Image (cartoon, rainbow, N blue to C red):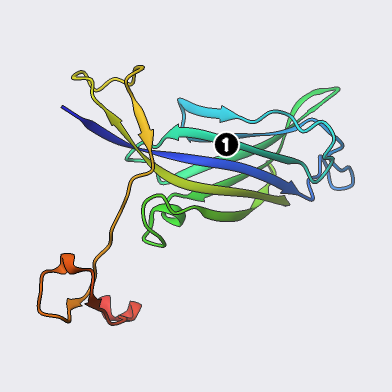
Amino acid sequence: MVATTQAIEITVISGEELFLSRKKRVRRNAYAIVKTDTSNSQTTNEDKDGGSNPTWNEKLTMNLPNHARYLIVEVHCKTSSGDKIVGVANVPTSDFLGGYGHQGYLHFLSYRLRDLNSEKNGIINIAVGTKIIENTNSDYGFSGETKMGWQECRTEVGIPIDGTKMSSGMVAGFPVGYNSYK
């Protein structure tokens, strides 16, 4: 039996205009942590030289729980006095799962970071794509037999214009305004 679960592939691209305090810019050792829930997180390597505009370009693949409404992206900086949270962004899962592209579509997104006082503190740039995980184990655990690949998705919306089944690939659609659903 094959079980499937949704996974995401996040590329943490870069940060912009990061500050440790109102007047003190991040100089080095910035890194990002991405969380899909309290027990599932991954961390990028530190950017040793990027200063207040770090670049990571690191790809992280994570399971996405069905109940997840947000991803949390935290940017930290290692300083001589310890680890400091520079800023946090909550990324709604609807931004990359909400019908703005098919399964596997890569979304390039930028979010405002907020520090622990909810003040604006820079921007985080990420790319998010969804994946499908197929598991052939009967216990549905994730072991070495798990295979990952982009899921192919074909969306057919509209009315067939040639009188055949929808699978012919030719359809006519019409736009519906948001207010039509109220």
Q: Quadrant of the C terminus?
A: bottom left
Q: Residue at x 17, y 77 (%)?
A: 159
Q: Quadrant of the N terminus?
A: top left
Is 61 placed above or below 24 here?
above
Is 117 placed above or below 77 here?
below
Res. 182 visible in picture = no
Residue 14 at x, y percent in the picture: 70, 45
Question: Viewed as shown, does residue 123 lie left or right of 109?
Answer: right
Q: Residues within 10 Å of mark 1 (few under 14, many from 20)?
A: some
Q: Which residue is mark 1?
A: 59
Q: Residue at x 32, y 20 (%)?
A: 145
Question: Viewed as shown, does residue 81 lie left or right of 148?
Answer: right
Q: Quadrant of residue 65?
A: top left
Q: How many marks?
A: 1
SS class of the residue under badge 1? strand
Task: Check disc 1 and give the amino acid type.
Answer: Lys
Q: Residue at x 17, y 64 (%)?
A: 167
Q: Quadrant of residue 178?
A: bottom left
Res. 111 visible in picture = yes
Residue 91 at x, y percent in the picture: 52, 49
Residue 107 at x, y percent in the picture: 51, 55
Question: Viewed as shown, does residue 152 lie left or right of 58?
Answer: left
